[in-house]
Image: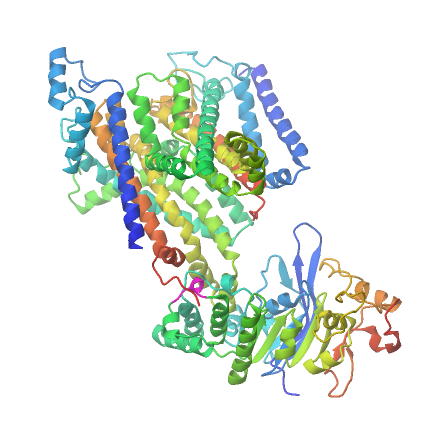
Amino acid sequence: MTEPLLRVRDLKTYFVTEQGSGTARSVDGVSFEVQPGETLGIVGESGCGKTVTSLSILRLIPEPPGHIRPGSVIEFEGRNLLTLEPRELRAIRGNQIAMIFQEPMTSLNPVFTVGDQIAEAAIVHQGLSRRVARTRAIDMLRLVGIADPEERVDHYPHQMSGGMRQRVMIGMALVCHPKLLIADEPTTALDVTIQAQILELLDRLQAELGMAVMLITHDLGVVAGSADRVAVMYAGQVVEQAPTAALFARPLHPYTEGLLASVPRLDAPPAREHGRLHSIPGQVPAATAWPEGCRFHPRCPYAWERCRAEMPPLLDAGGGGEPGTHTVRCWLLTEPRRRTPHP
Amino acid sequence: MAAWLVRRLVASIAIVFAVVTITFFVVRLAHGTPCGPAGERPLPPDVCERQRVQFGYDQPLPVQYGKYLVALRHGELGESFGLHRPVADALADAIPNTFTLALAALLVDFALGLALGIYQAVRAGRFGDVAVGNVALLVNSMPVFWLGLVLLLVFAQWLRWFPAGGIHNPILCPRLASPYCLLDFLWHLVLPALTLGLVGAAGTARYQRAAMLEVIRQEYVRTARAKGLRERRVLLVHALRNALLPIITLFGLAFPFLFTGAVLIETVFAWPGMGRLAVNAIFQRDYPVVTGAAVLTTTMVVLGNLIADVLYAVVDPRIRVQRGGGDGGSA
Amino acid sequence: MSVWTWLTLGGAAVLALAVVAELRRRLQTSAPGRRFFRHPTAALGLFVLAFFVAIALAAPVVAPYPPYYQIDIAHPNRPPSAQFLLGTDPFSRDVWSRLVYGARVSLGIGALATLVAVTVGTAVGAVSGYFRRWVDTTLMRLVDVGLAMPRIFVLLMAVALWEHIALWALVLLIGLTGWFGTSRLVRAEVLSLREREFVAAARALGAGAGRVIFRHVLPNAAAPIIVSGALGIGNMMLLEAGLSFLGLGVPSPAPSWGNMIADGWHRMAVAWWSSTFPGLAISLVVMALNAVGDALRDALDPRREAV
């Protein structure tokens, strides 16, 4: 296997809550890798810690309430991002690793033109003059599929639709040809049709620019179409990791099973379980009070005593391919016969 | 944009007009007709009557009003009783002094207020923020004339660093005739401008802190950091530009505040500006001066608000588009 | 300052503390109450206000000398001492006693003038916002003119051009020149509230406009009115102080904090205490009002996040 572009080992990001309800351990020991040029999808419900994970990579966590625990390792091309000097970190942000966010309207500065905002990264990181940077901005607008880029470059964010703004965000992120793009729920705030266009755009750009993408979403459909590998997160941890096809064909973690089963299918038989859609019972626990043992056990149809007592590590699920391709955090791997739902 | 501007101008002129009319009639209706300044010896009745005719006070009010308006068009504001010179001249002498005082105070106000507000926002919740905040609250609550007195006491009386009032050294510099006299003028300007400026700065700091805090929480600040920009640039370029918008409203509000403050400060520091002129005229029942000063100050206040509105449109592109500036469309 | 006056002074402070503590206890149960007391300056501000109100009310007991009494005309301007807590002024009157009696005047004028301003402003704003159309336009034009006129100028003119102004007239004038901002605030609230269903429901039941406005709309608009009132008292007090300082407000020898500053002004060089202490009193009270007003604003409007 080639050297991974990004390697995250045992990342822990905690937040101090003000009401004294204790520390929120939003990210509690997350590990994964991103290879150059591949798309890693990170999937999970709200509150599982996926956004905090992505923000932690670029160290964008606000320091007073949050902090990244010592012992966490985030290596980009072999360098530990967590020990970099501010100046070195800034050289990476927007330049080698770029990030786009969920809400393009609030993530773009309303008082600057889109051209200025795109050009800024080029000016700061590549030392381009304003004129050259402006040309680059126009090129980027064209690249992301915005019509009339020469005119649009002087427009303000509020003069554009949501889809266009997201394209601008992508253009802003890619202007320095980063090696890794972190996309935090890039399509959640958009219409379904626009969603498809944006995902297609990301695919195309990834192929053209040869960059890796970390795609964070709660939508399995998004991940199915765009990701090479998927990491499923729950309660601040990765609970299953596999190539996309393998994950969808053979979901091993009960949570993944539940997620997949919750997606309504057009080809499903009409009457299923009292005619209702499947959902995972219970709720996502609060980050200040993770359950003992396996964090999913209160909601798991297969849980037994061991699950309540001991937290399972990430176990190799085999299934062909190199060891570590498909890992699952579940005791069922050691006792597969328990995979029968309780009555 | 142009249409909106014209509408605002017309509204402003209407307001000034209304104020002029109100002032005119209030002044005339209060206390009957004057017979010379209240401070002088009362004039014998026939002299008084001749004065009345001379100044046109024997004619019916609407006629007086009409004549006043006509004269106003020509820039004539009447003749002052007490000063025995045209009102316009007296005002013209006094206005530059008030203007320089207000300008200097505005400078202190915004320079100090913005800096403190930004500092407070960056250090939000910590000791620096709380300390500055409470001091600002106290200063903002002080009567502006009392602060002037205290500063006079400390800096002019005890420490003797600055003069105890006035606008110039009457012996050496009766006129602004040399660089030395300019320095002398500035030296006299420090305390009054500081007084007005400090109280104003305290208010501005509170506003600016709130505006910056609001902005810093916005996601586009996070985006700017994610682009790898220096923190200083993130704060001073991306955040500040948005936080300045509400400050512009403050700028428009500063005008009435400055005039109020000027009246009191000019009295405390014996600064020969329009405020002091107006106060003296009121005491002496010098109605032409009072009316003229009212007209002028209202015009300035209205102008200040107009400028603030225009500035707002210039700085915030969203408002510009709303008022018909950009193409306003989306695709 | 006899032992008795010291005792009553201490008593006033204790009373103020008790009032604040009791308020705090009572308000713990409601969310706005808890939010209010989250501000450290709020409790302090309440204490300062309670203290000054207490000594104003108990003036005859807390002040060792009557306010007009000239103690020793031959030796005015005595510095602060055990006998004269804050010294004597150029007319040889005890500054502390005058301060205490002046509290009645200054606080009273501030509160009453605010009452006038808030009442008029609320009425105008409510009518304007509820009836809209030409009523709204005319009233708001009036407000524009009112806001454009420099307030102190209007007050100076009005007060000076009528010879001797009675205290009630002064209160009315200060109040009547200060309602414009409140009216705009109330109008905005009423405009948004009138579209709500409870208004339609009330009208469907046959309620007349007045009833709808008073019983249904205004109670919901109460929060910004209260906040603007609290902050307004401070402004009114500063205005009264300025007028009195110029000699146009409360007439001597009746003490108000403003004219006390004027009395001592010309002797500042030798007797700084005459002018300094009244000004300090104004600053503290206005600061307390501002702190309380800010805390009220945060407490009554849960949409604002405190930092």
B292 to B47, vertically: above or below: below
Quadrant containing the C terminus of chain B is bottom left
The answer to which of C182 and C85 lies nearer the viewer is C182
C271 to C68, vertically: above or below: below
Judge whether residue A157 is colored magenta: yes
The answer to which of B268 and B36 lies nearer the viewer is B36
Percent coordinates x, y for residue B10 in the rendering: 27, 44
B46 to C150, vertically: above or below: above
The answer to which of C126 and B94 lies nearer the viewer is C126
Quadrant in the rendering for residue C15: top right
Q: Specify the segment rendered in magenta.
A: A155-160
Percent coordinates x, y for residue B211 in the rendering: 47, 51
Percent coordinates x, y for residue A15 in the rendering: 66, 59
Residue drawn at point x = 26 percent, y = 21 percent:
B29
The answer to which of A70 and B264 lies nearer the viewer is B264
Quadrant containing the N terminus of chain B is bottom left
What colour scheme governs how the chains and residues are painted in the rendered image of this protein? rainbow
